[in-house]
Amino acid sequence: MSFYEFVEGPLWYFAAAVFIAGVVWRIVALVMIGKPGDLSVSHKSSALGAAKAILLHSVPHGGNLSRTIYHVISGYLFHLGLFALLLFAAPHIAFVNKYIAVPWPAMPRWAFIIAAEAAFAGLILLYIRRLTDPVIRQLSDWDDHIGTWLTFIAMLTGCLALQEAHDGLRILHMLSVQALMIYFPFSRLMHAFTFVLSRAHTGATYGRRGFTP
Amino acid sequence: MSETAANGPRPINVQAAVDKFNALTGSHIASYLDACIHCGQCAQACHFHEVTNDPRRVPAVKLAPITKVYRRHKAPFSGLRKAVGLAPELTERDLTEWEELIFDSCTMCGRCTVVCPMAIDIASIVALSRQAFVAAGLGPEDLLQAADNSRDKGSPLGVTSKVLADRIEWLEDEHDVEIALDKEHAEVLLLVSSIEFMKYPDSVVAMAKLLNHAGANWTLSSKGYEATNFGFLSGKADIAKTMISRITEAAEAVGAKTVIVPECGHAFGVLRWSGANILGRPLPYDVAHITEFLAALKRAGKLRLRPMERSITYHDPCQISRRGGATADARYLLDDFATDFREMAPTGNYNWCCGGGGGVQAIGRAADVRHEVFRIKMAQVEETGAGAMVSACSNCRLTMDESKTALGWDKELMSLVEILADHLDTDREAA
């Protein structure tokens, strides 16, 4: 078995297994900690509050837009760009089709370029803020930096591998993505899933009081 | 070691704090701790950061002690983290360094939750963190003393049942108003805040006038009269439960269907939304803030008022509006009554805190920063051009009154129940 075959075969399956099992375990373990019931008399629906909070906290509200505009713009650039690349880049669709045949539209090259530029711009802007803003520097730890760098390297190698002109570049991208996948469940990158739980808890708690913050 | 002037160094029991953090970390708290992405946006919503620009006085920083315990003991993969040395234990130094942030620098106003992309309820985490700090032997002496006073004397300011009876007798004579105390049966049990009794007794008189005007069958009870819950605010859970138990026993004794919380935001939040959970059983009565109860009376046509022409603005107590769900009722009371009412910006559910909620009012060493916080409110009021600021929380009022004096501000601070009572249309008594 060549190194390329190893990376695309056993190592890929290992990384995918760690990612899926890790994410599922972390969410299940988190939920299984349990929480005491709320005995207070509800004023309004907690379920509606949870649903509202999940949606509402995706956008700035409460008059805070001007204060958080940097994060809003850079955050949306990064996340929209990243998910466009992840879901609609032609090589990703071809890769998935090796395992499951799904009709999935690939984005044209110009859209890939725009998505990549947005994702890089957003990530770099967010990281500059992390390095320079006294508040965020105070809050940041090694996990924040590792997560950012792994994401950056996965994106960079992905762009380098776009032409698929060289197997080495493609394997480099595979390796960096696998590192990201293995790191993911143990890190703050899990916010990609835990944001739903966090928002839902607050929405349910305060929605039943009558105002979803 | 923590130093106190009166008692010298206090022993710090780190393990007790760890145990308490672990006991209080449910899946909702765990979700919050796992979701924080360290973006720092909460700083933009916090009045303490707003006025100090101190990168430590940031809501998310206050999550650090509980997060440390969670990651070592309770988080998924905590065993793995511990094995590779990536989950250090909470230390005495952590506790002493965070004490001021947990107690002095959070009014539990919940403004940070609004701006947080993860909607993390940091205020609730601060409330439970205080329990862990107190278990370790930490916490501001004056705040803890207020809680002990509540347990031992009946109220944080030493209003015993005898003082209550004496003050009521005096107020009845002074203001020619009937203030019901210890009626055998009543549909409504009215609570009072000792801040009102000792600093703003006109507020108690006003509530009595309004309830009498509406023909309500109400009483105060010497068995359970104190609305504030410094047990909750200080992190002393046993005292929190004692205070809720007293109110509940008093309500059951008079057969009250409704318990009215007076002008105090935290008193309302604790009894209305945490009371049953603290007590461990559903409350056998409805809880209404005085503004909710008066709004219901107004809707029923039982509150007849003469218009007030003076220009006013309204300060929303955080625990009644954003965290209490009763934002609309104060404005309903002001509708068609305050003819020159001017809203601040931001207001309602997104208001800025007075700076003294969450027990911070009782912490003497926090006075300077409270005064700085009040500058935000001063600027907001100035912008409206209103001549006076009205609120429905005696704790907010006391906080702002003290800051007003310290800063030499000339606007008037008023109580909502007092202005309503002053404008009762006595020629048209309630039907």
Image (cartoon, coloured by chain):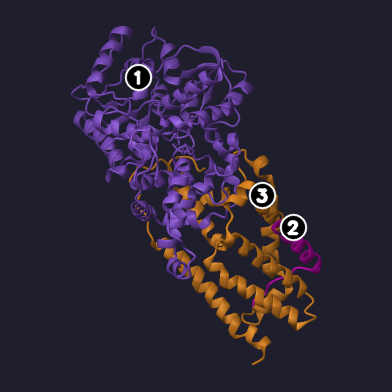
How far from the left and from the top, in percent, is residue B37?
A: 57, 55
Residue A111 shown in magenta: yes
Callout in the foreground (2, 1): 1
Range of the magenta residues? A102-123
Amino acid type of disc 2?
Ala
Q: Is residue B328 above or below residue A167?
A: above
- Mark 2 on the same chain as mark 1: no
The residue tagged 2 is: A121
Res A151 quadrant in image: bottom right
How far from the left and from the top, in percent, is residue B329?
A: 46, 28
How far from the left and from the top, in percent, is residue B217?
A: 27, 22
The reply to whether residue B148 is in sight is yes
Q: What element carries label 1?
A: helix
Dot 3: within a 10 Å radius of its alpha carbon, few (fewer than 14), some, or many (20 or more) residues?
some
Query: Mark 3 or mark 2, which has the lower sequence index?
Result: 3
Chain in purple in the render:
B
The residue tagged 1 is: B198
Dot 1: within a 10 Å radius of its alpha carbon, few (fewer than 14), some, or many (20 or more) residues?
few
Colour of chain A, in one word, is orange
How far from the left and from the top, in percent, is residue A146?
A: 62, 64
Spot the residue most to the front.
B8
Callout in the foreground (1, 3): 1
Dot 2: within a 10 Å radius of its alpha carbon, few (fewer than 14), some, or many (20 or more) residues?
some
Q: A81 or A189: nearer the eye?
A: A189
Q: Is mark 2 on a helix, strand or loop?
A: helix
The C terminus of chain B, quarter of image: top left
The residue tagged 3 is: A71
Q: Residue B74 carries which label?
A: none
